[in-house]
Amino acid sequence: MINIRTAVRKELPLIDSLNREGFAEGLVLKRSKKDLKALIKNENIFVAVKDNKEFVGMVTLDFYSKRLSELRSIYIKENFRKSGVGKKLLDAVFEKAKRMRIKEIMVITSKELRRWFSKSGFNNKPHKFKIALFKKL
């Protein structure tokens, strides 16, 4: 069984390892331990944990303002992709954002993942460097 929850401080090494794995695959940007620690402190890292022991995915919510926050560092281990873990992680972020009364979440993503995010309600607002997708809450 896979549970989605916020990360706690003692899990920093596991979260850092997941982030490095995603970075090595070219799927996420590398985050510093200091950055990850601050996100954990603010309960802005969500993790997918299998059987309460194996970390199989993560996502972060970077809070900018009540108007706009950014979904970053979403990564799911390869064996767990296309299993619904990503959707569960997004749903956890959306719930937190709604509780915080955030009006919009953006994600900067690759062309390959654009369709996946679009299925979750993100709409395209073209940018000259990247594809920025937004979701009104």
Image (cartoon, grey):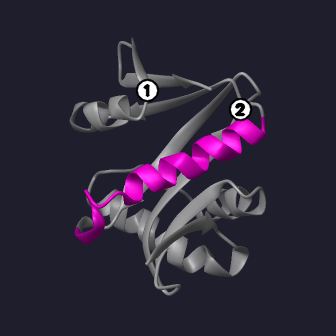
- Looking at the rendered structure, the kind of residue marked 1 is Phe
Q: Is residue 27 above or below residue 19?
A: above
* Real-space CA distance between mark 2 and mark 1, rounded to the nearest whole angstrom: 18 Å
- Discs 2, 1 touching: Cβ within 8 Å: no
- The location of residue 8, given as percent across then percent down, is 70, 73
Could you tell me which residue is drawn at 24 percent across and 71 percent down? Answer: 79
Could you tell me which residue is drawn at 30 percent across and 38 percent down? Answer: 116
**Which residue corresponds to mark 2?**
64
Q: Nearer the viewer, mark 2 or mark 1?
A: 1
Alpha-carbon neighbours of circle 1 within 10 Å: few (<14), some, or many (≥20)?
many
Q: Determine if the magenta segment contains residue 98.
A: yes
Most common SS among magenta residues: helix
Give the number of the disc on residue 122: 1
Q: Is residue 79 left or right of residue 45?
A: left
**Which quadrant of the figure contains the C terminus?**
top right
SS at mark 1 in the image: loop
Magenta-highlighted residues? 79-100
- The location of residue 110, given as percent across then percent down, is 29, 35
| Nearer-N-terminus badge (2/1) | 2
Could you tell me which residue is drawn at 67 percent across and 53 percent down? Answer: 44
- Looking at the rendered structure, the kind of residue marked 2 is Tyr
**Which quadrant of the figure contains the N terminus?**
bottom left
SS at mark 2 in the image: loop
Give the number of the disc on residue 108: none
Q: Is residue 69 left or right of residue 24?
A: right
Q: Is residue 60 above or below residue 137?
A: below
- The location of residue 25, given as percent across then percent down, is 26, 59
Camera-side residue of 92 and 41: 92
Q: Is residue 22 left or right of residue 70?
A: left
The answer, for residue 110, to whether it is visible in the render is no
Q: Quadrant of residue 24?
A: bottom left
